[in-house]
Image (tube, grey):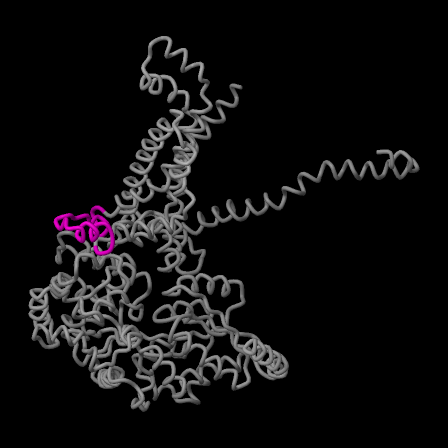
Amino acid sequence: MNHFKRHLTALAVSAALMPTAAVHAGEVEVLHWWTAGGEARAAAALKQMMEEQGHTWKDFAVAGGGGEAAMTVLKTRAVSGNPPAAAQIKGLDIREWAKLGFLTSLDSVAEAENWDQLIPPRISDVMKYEGEYVAVPVNVHRVNWLWVNPDVMENVGVEVPTTLDEFFEVADKLKAEGYIPLAHGGQPWQDATVFDAVALAELGPDDYRKAFVDHDMDVINSEKMEEVFAQFAKVMSYVDDDAAGRDWNTATGMVIRGEAAMQIMGDWAKGEFTAADLTPGEDYLCAPAPGTTGQFTFNVDSFAMFSLTEEDDIKAQKDLARTILEPEFQTLFNQNKGSIPVRTDMDMSDFDTCAQASMETFKSSADDGGLVPSFSHGLATTSYIQGQIFDVVTNFVNSNNPDPVKTTDQLAAAIKSAM
Amino acid sequence: MEHTQRRPAGVARASSGLMDGLQRWLPKLVVAPTFLLVGIGIYGYMLWTGVLSFTNSSFLPSYEFVGLEQYAKLMESERWLVASWNLAIFGGLFIGICLLIGVVLAIFLDQRIRQEGAIRTIYLYPMALSMIVTGTVWRWILNPSLGLEKLMHDWGWTSFSFDWLVDSDFAIYTIVMAAVWQASGFVMALFLAGLRGVDSSIMRAARVDGASLPMIYWKIILPSLRPVFFSSVMVLAHIAIKSFDLVMAMTSGGPGYSTDLPAVFMYAHTFTRGQMGLGSASAMLMLGAILALLVPYLYSELREKRHD
C-alpha cells in the first residue's frame, strides 16, 4: 500500500512537471530493440540523460532479437513521412537509408565535438554518407573472440590456442578426454560468425577486406578461399552433433558448465558469463580467436538520425547524438552491454580485463590495418550479399560431404548474383 | 405500420420513399466496409506485390521496372529450389498421410464404440494448439540431446539413434511428422461427419447382399464421400503452402536452409534481407501454386452447382 502511494505521488509530481518541460524542449523518439537485461538498463540511462537536458524521450521499443520486427515498423513510419528521430540501424544499411534521402546530416555536432579525432576512420566511414555523418556509433563489439573454460583446459593439460594449428591440436586432446572442444549453435549467423574468424585467420586483414568489403573476385574465387573453407570445415568438425538450431547463449552455457571447452563468439557472450557470476581472467578466459591475434573484427551498433521538421525536435536530436558519444554514456552503456566505447580516448580502468584487452587491440589494429568490419554482422556488406554468403556458408556446414572447391565457386556465384 | 397510416399523407409518402431507399441501400452499405477492406487488404496488396515483383525494390518499394529479372534470379537461386522441392515433399507427404490416418481413424470411430466422444476429442485436440506450440514441443521431443534419443539412452538403450531433426537430409520429414500430428485429427473429424451423414440403409442393403465391411467402406461409402475428400485436400493444401510458423518454431529453416519452405524464403528475403523484389516474385509463384489448386476445384464446384 505504502509502495503504491509512493508511486502515486511520483506520478503526480512528474505529471505536474511534465508540461513545463515539454514547452521548452523537443521530443526525441528513439526506435531500438534494447528491451532485455543490461541493454534495457543502458537504454533507460540514455533516456534519463536526455530528460536531464530537458527533452522528452519517447520510447519506440520494438522487441524481437535482431530487430526484424523493428525494421518493418520503421519502414512503414518512414514511408508515411513520420519517422522517429533516431533508429537503431547499423552497418551498410545506414548507407541504404541515406541513399533514399531519409537521414539528416550531423556534421554540425560532429565538428563541434570533434568526432573525426575521437573515432577511428574505419568506424566513422560506416557512419558517413557522402562525407557527412548521418549516424552516431554507440559501441564496438569485437567479434573474433574465443571464450574458454580454464578448468577444462587445465584438466586436459592444454593451453589456450593462438593459431588454427594449435586449435586443432588442443581440440583433439579435448575430444579424447570426452569434452566437446567447440561449443556452437547451428544457426546461419553463428556459422557465419565462426567462418568470419577463420577467414580472417587464413586470409589476413587485407584479403579479408578485398573479399568481403570490395568483393574482389580474385580473392573470393581463389585457392586461398578454398583453404578457408577447408580449415572452416575442420574447425566445425569439433562441434557436437546436436548443435543444429541451438541458440548462442545455450552454447555459452555449455562452456560455463564445463561440457564444452571453447566458443567463438562476439563479446556479447560476456553477458552470459557475468550473469553466472563469473570473473574474467579467473573463471573464464577471453582470447583472440585462433590465428587472429592483434586483429579486430568490429561490429558497431549505431543510431541513424532521420530528417525532422520541428525546430525543437531537431535540437533534441542533435543533443541525443552528442550525449551518445559523451564519455559518461559510453562507459555506462558499454559496461552494461559487454562492448567497448567507440571513442579511443576513454579511461578504461573501470572496465573488466576482457574489455581492456579489447580496447588495446582496437587502438593498435586501427593503426596497423588489422581492424576489419565483420561481414557476419552486416558491417562489411549489404544485407543481401551478406544473406547470400550466409546461405553458402551454412549450406557448407550442414552438407554431409562438404566440398571446399565447389563451395568456393558457389560463393563467387552467389556474391556475383547479388552485386 | 399503424403509425404511418395516422400521419398526414405527404409525410407518409416521403418517409416511405426514404424507407424504401434505405431498404434498398442498407445491405449494400453494411457490406461495403467489408468489401472495401477485402478489396484493398487482400486483392489490392496482391496486385501491389505483383507489381513489386517486376521492380528492383530492395528494402523499400521502388518502381524501377526490370521485367522478369527477379523471377530469373529466383530460378537460379539454389535456396529457392530447395524450398520448392521441400514444399513438394512436405505437401505430398503431409496431405497423403493426413488423409490416410484421418480416414482410418474416422472409420474406426464410426463403429459405434464406447467413449467415442472422449476419443474423438483426444484426436481432434492437437488442432486446437497453435503451430508454434506444436513446433516447439516437437523440437524438444526430436532434439537428440533433449528428447527421445536422450530418453532411450537414459533407459539403457544406448545404441538408439534418432537425429533426423539435426540432419539436413532428413529434417524436412520431422516437420511432416509434427504437421501430421497436428492436422490428422481434423481430417478425421471431417470424415466422421461425412460418414455419419451416409444413409445407414445403404449399409444394411449392402450387408444383405453379402458384402463384407471393408468392401462396403471401400466400394460404397468412401466413394460417396468425394466432396469431403475434396474439402480436406483443399484445406490441407492451404496449410502446406502457407506453412511458416511450424518451420520457424521447429527448425527456423535449418539445419542450414534445408527445411526452407517458400513462405520462409519469402519472409527472409522480403523482410530481413532487403530484397523486396525477389521476395515478391516468390510470393507470386506461391500464389500461382495456390491458384493451380484452387481454379480446378472452383471450376468443378461451380459446374456441379449449374447442374442442380
Query: Considering depth in this image, is B279 or B254 the residue closer to the camera?
Result: B254
Q: Residue furthest right?
A: B8
Instruction: Locate residue A276 relative to residue B35 in the image: left or right.
Output: left
Residue B203 visible to the viewer: yes
- Name the residue located 27 percent from the left edge and 50 percent from the top edge: B141
Residue A416 visible to the viewer: no
Compared with B243, A293 (above or below) is: below
Identify the magenta region.
Answer: B145-170
Query: Considering depth in this image, is A398 or A228 the residue closer to the camera?
Result: A398
Compared with B22, A328 (above or below) is: below
Task: Name the main secondary structure of what is drawn in magenta.
Answer: loop
- For residue B228, which quarter of the picture? top left
Measured as percent of width and height from the top left, residue B20 is found at 77, 35
Instruction: Locate residue A257 relative to residue B42 in the image: left or right.
Output: left
Measured as percent of width and height from the top left, residue A281 is found at 20, 82
- Name the residue located 29 percent from the left edge and 47 percent from the top edge: B83
Query: Considering depth in this image, is B284 or B103 the residue closer to the camera?
Result: B103
- For residue A226, which quarter of the picture? bottom left
- Whether residue B203 is in magenta: the answer is no
* Quarter of the image that includes the N terminus of chain B: top right
Q: Residue furthest front?
A: B114
Measured as percent of width and height from the top left, residue A405 is found at 12, 57
Instruction: Locate residue A311 relative to residue A284 in the image: left or right.
Output: right
Compared with A362, A39 (above or below) is: above
- For residue B222, which quarter of the picture? top left
- Name the residue located 33 percent from the left edge and 43 percent from the top edge: B179
Measured as percent of width and height from the top left, residue A114 is found at 39, 89
How many numbered callouts? 0
Query: Considering depth in this image, is B120 or A241 the residue closer to the camera?
Result: B120
